[in-house]
Amino acid sequence: MYHVQFKRLSGNEDIAIPQKMSEWAAGFDLQAAVGESIVLAPGERKLIPTGFAMAMPGELEAQIRPRSGLAYKHGITCLNAPGTIDADYRGEVKVLLVNLGQEPFTITRGERIAQMVFQLVPAVTIVEADELPDTVRGAGGFGHTGV
């Protein structure tokens, strides 16, 4: 079990800390902590505040992902999905939303705008090598496997 601390930022007492909406949900829903409604025009992107900061153990990262309902119904998604929040970041968590739909979309205070999934980050050491071991695929790139 990993413990992640959340700090609600001043003026956001009405915004819920991230929470799962069902028992087996992988993601914690994030709410918009906008001061007033924001209209996101088609093709437009904006950084939306969530009203909290957090501290998590170094073994974790938080990934910010789109909500499938907003993506399907309105074309609203996260531009850099998944966005990564590193364990040493202590600023306000914000979500970079983009409107890929055909109509303007209004983001209201308290609206669920994205989800946050926690993942383990393995300890990795980068080792420079003069040669790499061969594989069947080799240097085959995009589309090489027939997909």
Image (cartoon, grey):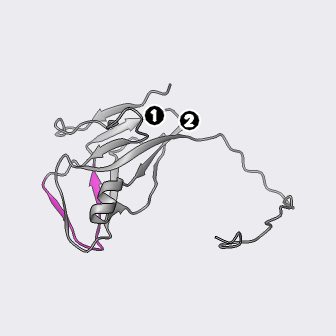
The residue carrying mark 2 is 59
Q: Look at the image and tell me whether residue 97 can be seen.
A: no
Numbered marks: total: 2
Q: Are marks 1 and 2 in contact (CB under 8 Å)?
A: no
Three-letter code for the amino acid on which mark 2 is drawn: Glu
Which quadrant: the C terminus? bottom right
Q: Nearer the viewer, residue 83 or 73?
A: 73
At 15% from the left and 51% from the top, the residue drawn is 35
Element class at badge 1: loop
Where residue 71 appears, as percent x and y from the top left, is 33, 61
Q: Which residues are magenta?
A: 36-49
**68 to the left or right of 41:** right
Q: Residue beneath label 1, please? A: 56
Residue at (31, 55) in percent of width and height: 69
Snapshot quadrant of residue 58: top right
- Percent coordinates x, y for residue 64 in the rendering: 41, 50
Q: Is residue 104 left or right of residue 84?
A: left
